[in-house]
Image (tube, coloured by chain):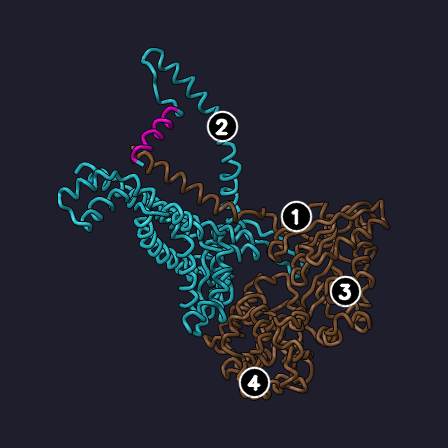
Chain colours: A cyan, B brown
Amino acid sequence: MSTKLPERTQAKAKAEGHHMPGRESADRKQVTQGRWASLLLLPTLVLLAIVIIYPVVNAIIMSFQKDAGLNAATGFFEQGGAAGFDNYAHWLLQQCNGQACPPGTIGSQFWSAFGTTFFFTVVTVALETVLGFWMAIIMARSFRGRSAVRAAVLVPWAIPTAVTAKLWFFIFAFDGIANKLFGTQILWTGSEWPAKWAIVISDTWKTTPFMALLILAGLQLIPDEVYEAAKVDGATAWQRFTQITLPLVKPALMVAVLFRVLDALRMFDLPYIMTQGANNTTTLSILVVDQIREGFNSAAALSTITFIVIFLVAFIFVRFLGANAVGAATSSGKK
Amino acid sequence: MRKTFSKYGAPLAMASVLALALSACSGGSSSGGGGGGGGDASSNLDGRGPITYVQGKDNSNVVRPLVDKWNAAHPDQKVTFKEQSDSADQQHDDLVQHFQGKDTNYDVVDVDVIWTAEFAAKGWLQPLKDKLAFDTSAMLPATVKTATYSGTLYAAPQTSDGGLLYYRKDLVPNPPKTWDEMMSMCSIAKQNNIGCYAGQFQKYEGLTVNASEAINTFGGKIVDDSGKAAVNSSDAKTGLGKLVDAFKSGNIPAEAITYKEEDSRTAFQDGKLLFLRNWPYVYSIASKTDGSSKVADKFGIAPLPGKSGPGASSLGGHNVAMSVYSKNKATALDFMKFMTSQETETFYATQGSLAPVLSSLYSDQTLVQKLPYLPTLLTSIQNAVPRPVTPFYPAVTKAVEDNAYAALKGDKTVDQAVADMQSAIEAAK
């Protein structure tokens, strides 16, 4: 990473027209280059506007409109009109038509889904980071068949999530392999904690390889000489791990964790297929998809809330933990 | 240098990931309601010309031969078959998107019985009256009910489906006629060390089917004829209570809370159940003599057990409807008649094992020979109560599923569950 980044930043500077070849007529050159650059960037920007900005803005606009309501007299749905913050209040305060949403409505599930989503995120990412780190350290060593191991590790990640979910669904069925193997009679998808752990296990199985590979990439950038020098200085294996490996791999690790956290906060396929959200395994994304069938505008409000939540989490990561990672790496480099 | 990346690179990547997540949810435009019954429903009534027929994946290859047959006879009014995916949810969403876009190319569409009221209330389906009147007199009344919304016919029943009771005739010589009789036979199951009864009790659409069967069988209703929530009644509590009691006593084995259709079928086929509520498709699979079924010659079928006679099955099946945006409605009507004709229905039954909607076919000897369950299925459909016919079906089914599930697991009393069902259905507006 440390060798690649400067190149990238340089290239970026060039593209932005900051790179000045000579002093004379620099201003003019800069202007033409800047114009060229913006012209060249235009198609990309237009594309981004169409595929990202328009849908996002449209979703936000929709979230401030009422869903179509049934006119009891005609039996037909009618356009709802402006809703103000009603859709948001519906979710955040769990209000249905001015009263608390009764159990069995989507609105009553917002906060439990919120908690479930964060539970899954914290537990799965923690497990995946520890296991991924361990796998990465093993894969970083040189041994016979290393490339085969690396390829094999990728298999769970390469399987589409929906297929993974179906696979684990059968494993955790009452007559499934899990119960046969352990001689248990657990109703994995029939009660809260077994269902949650079934999902955590499947998710960990699926995404640990992703963590492992990202961390492995970070590990391989640490030069062997650093370890050799530490050994000469008499550092123990544990000291080498905490003083060298951890700080140096931290930038890569933080990026990996950030990606996983963002991904886990959007978790949908696994719980949707394995439990259909029963037994308190409904995540925010499942709630959004369920709500789409009952009313787009309310679903748009819910996805905007989800968006903001994920954005805040990501912001905290980048702003605080991310900055830390950079600081730690630089200071240890100076040592 | 690194700082530059972490400051700009990561947030940028992050923003794009998030935006993608969000944009996936904004597929539908804000034009939810169609206002219904306006100009679209009264125009192009005499239009003739090429049309499109939209249906989910044609797994047993029945639609293509039918369309070919139609096209050979009507060269100037050709039908193009547009095949959707085989996931019901995707078919629903695809139809919604095209209707919202007022697509004139979705002339005749195949709709699940539970979507018909929703699409009708959105003003997307052409009312079948006056010039476009459709004769349903030969069809089973319960199937016609699924196609009727606030007194008007909006679709034509095309195929039907009802629940059957599968029982082990080697252990139970005469099938139970009532629920209580069935429960009293559970001692036989105990002696043979197998489970007694199971249906589909996982929290999904199948639970709505099973719970409403119990509620309807004992005289309860989910919604009344005007579509208002009407579930909070002592009859409904009795019905749901029967299922809850059976779970408590172990007459329904505990693992049945994880059962969908296939899990329950496997359990019955492996000889682990005395009674099973399931759809007719199980019949041919469980009859296989290649060793996959341990009960191949040991099971029989009967109508669902009820309060004093046959139980009230929920209805499956599909209706065929016409889009209000179609330009060729006269052709569309003719095609709908063709798709529900006796000849077509027979073809559906023989080729695709799809239950007919015409009562006359259930006594047709050649058909009964091929599908021996037909006479029993007829009783089932004759006593059937359609799943709630309401434009808020997704909300209603969720209200039923969530609360019935909590009751079955013992997290809630039956009274509480039924009361919550009522208020959850009322919350949909």
Secondary structure under tag 4 reads helix
Closer to the camera in the image, A112 or B129: A112
Secondary structure under tag 1 reads helix
Disc 4: host chain: B
Instruction: Tell whether B206 sits left or right of A45.
Output: right
Callout 2: 10 Å neighbours few (<14), some, many (20+)?
few
Closer to the camera in the image, B39 or A232: A232
Asked if the magenta segment contains residue A264, the reply would be: no
Circle on res. B98: 1
Residue B391 appears at what percent x and percent y? 63, 61
Separation (CA) of disc 2 from disc 4: 73 Å
Residues beneath discs 2 and 3 located on the same chain: no
Instruction: Tell whether B124 sits left or right of A167.
Output: right
Callout 1: 10 Å neighbours few (<14), some, many (20+)?
some
The residue singled out by tag 4 in the image is B189
State which region is magenta.
A2-14
Disc 1: host chain: B
Separation (CA) of disc 4 from disc 3: 35 Å
Mark 4 / mark 1, whichever is N-terminal: 1
Above or below A220: residue B253: below
Callout 3: 10 Å neighbours few (<14), some, many (20+)?
some
Q: Farthest front residue? A: A144
The residue singled out by tag 3 in the image is B350
Above or below B382: residue A162: above
Residue type of the residue flagged with mark 2: Leu
The residue singled out by tag 2 in the image is A42
Separation (CA) of disc 2 from disc 1: 32 Å
Residue A153 can be seen, yes or no: yes
Separation (CA) of disc 2 from disc 3: 60 Å
Separation (CA) of disc 1 from disc 3: 32 Å
